[in-house]
Structures are given as structure tokens and as C-alpha cells.
Amino acid sequence: MAGTVVVGAQWGDEGKGKFVDLMSADMDFVVRYQGGHNAGHTIVIDEERFTLQLIPCGIMYDHVTPVIGNGVVVDPKVLVEEIEALEARGVSCEKLKLSGNAHLIFPYHQEIDEAIERRLGDAKLGTTKRGIGPAYADKAARVGIRAQDLLDKDIFIKKLEISLSEKNLLLSKVYGRAELDLDEIVQDYLTNYKDQLSPYIADTVSLLNDALADEKNEKRVLFEGAQATFLDLDHGTYPFVTSSNCSAGGAATGSGVGPRHLTRIIGVAKAYSTRVGSGPFPTELDDEVGARIAEVGDEFGTNTGRARRIGWFDAVMLRHAVNINTMTELAITKLDVLDGIDELKVCVAYEVNGKKLDGVPYHQTDFHDAKPIYETFSGWDEAISAVESRDGLPSAAQDYLKFLEAEVGVPITLVGVGPGRAQFLQWSEV
């Protein structure tokens, strides 16, 4: 299988990094295809934690070429700092490739992001205020500045001058904020980031397609998504979504690799549900059980530190995610967080205005009003973090996973039982 996509099946923070890291051992390329530094992965290797924001998880393997694809928006300051931090810890970034077509984030994007959230007040979207949305907006408006523009000083200054003149009007006249200085930004980006990033900038579309087209020595490519299905710009709980296509289809557009190469699509979901920020959440828990899951599961954002909202597993949404992504399999994370909970629940349908719905309602009003219909299961008392096989799990945990597998409709192949690199077990074969 040449092209494998790992995609979040819920609202993000599912622990995708653990399985991307696991699978990277057998890959030649690992590609990040969308998002920015508003998402992050935490990898635990020999009790040492590595937090990655922009660089793909494959960076941890010497034989892997990590690629930041054209669909990513890049804050060059963050990327340079991430490279330096990894190198300082003995992780080589020599093979890293950055698409020349990836768009750059500028200080005005972050200023606008923060101003919009403040202006929205109680109706705020819950963004990370890191400039991701405004950078994607510039991309769609065809006034964005790309990584390759750093390599031509004249083009860079000309594009920045045009963009900044408009953004300063917006900042000063609409949002009442101070204008930004052109010369300061030019000096910052061309002095601090151009030389540092130029060795990594490449034609990654040709690189990946050439690798996949070599029939005699076909390379294995893993596509790593940020965020998740229900934060997808088109298919998520709009407007409480991110600004890119983080479902499996985004892997093609965000890397320049055609969909025929995407032959294996793995959805990752927690054994319960979480989401960060605003938006509907039918199975949300506001009780002691939810607080316990949050504490045991360390449910705080990798990059932002924001507390995540907690809920029971929602099989209705997972079935929808399976369809959107054409998932071939599912990986379940954080099963161990449910240790010691007497009673577990799984949402199998919704009630909306007195009617039972087996699928996600298409109209946002109905989704906001959806009430979960649950199946209830017995929990288990045993700690499972040291379990290494399916048969080693308590019978109640096995029953829980069997039900999830049947309810969602695709095989569960891997189950995470702890944060460590080796804390997972094989559940079903594909």
C-alpha cells in the first residue's frame, strides 16, 4: 500500500501522533498536508516527550523524509524554533522538506485573528489566535505569500507591501489597532528566516509523485493530518471549524498526490470524545466523570494548554466520519483512561424534536438540539497500561471495543493503552 492517510475521526487531539510515529518506522516519506502550528503532536520515546507543531512525526526516524506539504500554512519563526529545538536534542532535520507552495503566516495575520475573536465576543469561534484562519483567507483571496517567495527578495517585498497596506487599513480603521511596519517585517523575515529555511524549501509535489511512480522501487508514503474530521472546513461543525480540509480528501490537495495513491485510510479516535473551543457537542459531560476523565487523560491542548471538553464516545459521528473519509480501519486511543469507571456509555443515535436519528443531522439547528441516545456498558477495575494483547484485556474492555467496532462499521486494528511509544496492542486484522 503506497499511500496511507492517518486522519482524526473526532474533533482533534485523538492521539494521532502516537500512531503516525508507530507507522513511520515502515515509511519512506511522512507528509503533513494541512493546518498550521494550531495543532500539535506529543510523542513519548523512552519516557522523553517530544512536542511537534509543524514538522511531521517521521522526523524521529533517520530513514524517513519528512515533508511539510503545500496545504500547510507556516509561521517561519515557529518552524525555525522547532528545527533548532529538535537539533539541540539530537534529532536531525537534514532531510526535512518544505513545499515552496506552502503559505506563510505574518504578524498581521495574528493581529487580525485576535481582533476578530475579540470583536465576536460571546459568539467567538474559539480559534488559537495564531493567524491560521487569516493566512488561509489570504490564500483563497490570492494575495498570500508563499515559502518560495522568501527566495526572491524583490518579489517578497513587493507582495508584502501590497498585502500590508491593505491589512494596516483593516487593523487601524476597523479594529482600532496599531499599524505594522513594513521594514520591520522585511528585516525580520529576510534576516532571520530566509537563510535558515531556504535549504529545506523544495518542489515537494514532484518529489512525492516521482517516489510513488517508480514501479521498481515504489516508496511508502504516510500522510499525516492535523485537527480532525469534524473540524474540517467543509465537513465539520461549521463555523466552529478550522480553516483547512483536514479530512482524508485534504491529503490529496494538500500534498499534490492524486487520490488513487491513497489506498489505506486510518481514522484515529479516543475511547471517549473531546473537543476544544466552541461548538455543539451532543455527548458532553459536565459532571464528576467528565472531570475525572479530563484529569486522568491530561486533557489539555498540546500547544495552547486549553482545557478540553469531555464527552462519551459518539458512534453516530464516527459512522459519519467513516463515510467522509472512506476509512479502511480505526485506531482507538486512551482506552486506559477509562480504567476504574463503573459505567460507560456510547451514543448510538440522537433524539431531535422527539424523533430518533441514526445519522448526523445536516442542519446545524438540529445538531445543536440533538440529545444523545446511549447504550450502557460495565466498566473494568483493572489497570490495562501494561496489557500487550487483545486477550489480556479485561472482558468488559473487550466487550466495549467489540461494540464500538460493530457500531462504527470498520475494523479496529490498533488500541492505545498508554502514552508510551510501545503502549498499544493489535485488535483486529484488516
Image: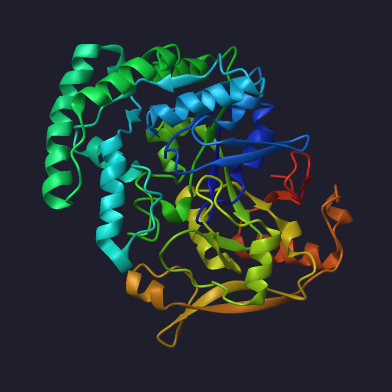
Residue name at image x 68 percent, y 58 percent: 297
Quadrant position of the N terminus in the picture: top right
Residue name at image x 24 percent, y 31 percent: 144
Foreground residue among 330 and 297: 297
Foreground residue among 59 and 413: 59
User: x%, y% of residue 148?
Assistant: 31, 18
> Relative to 377, is 63 on the left or the right?
left
> Relative to 240, is 311 on the left or the right?
right
User: x%, y% of residue 32?
Assistant: 49, 32
Foreground residue among 91 and 69: 91
Render colour scheme: rainbow
> Relative to 229, is 189 on the left or the right?
left
Q: Name the outermost residue toward the bottom.
A: 354
Residue name at image x 30 percent, y 36 percent: 107
Q: Answer above or below: position of 47 versus 117.
A: above
> Relative to 46, is 262 on the left or the right?
left
Total marks in image = 0
Q: Answer above or below: position of 53 versus 294.
A: above
Foreground residue among 397 and 279: 279
User: x%, y% of residue 202?
Assistant: 41, 15
Q: Answer above or below: position of 60 versus 175.
A: above
Decide if residue 135 is in sight here.
Answer: yes
User: x%, y% of residue 272?
Assistant: 63, 63
Residue name at image x 64 percent, y 70 percent: 291
Decide if residue 64 is in sight here.
Answer: no
Quadrant position of the C terminus in the picture: top right
Residue 99 lies in what quarter of the image? top left
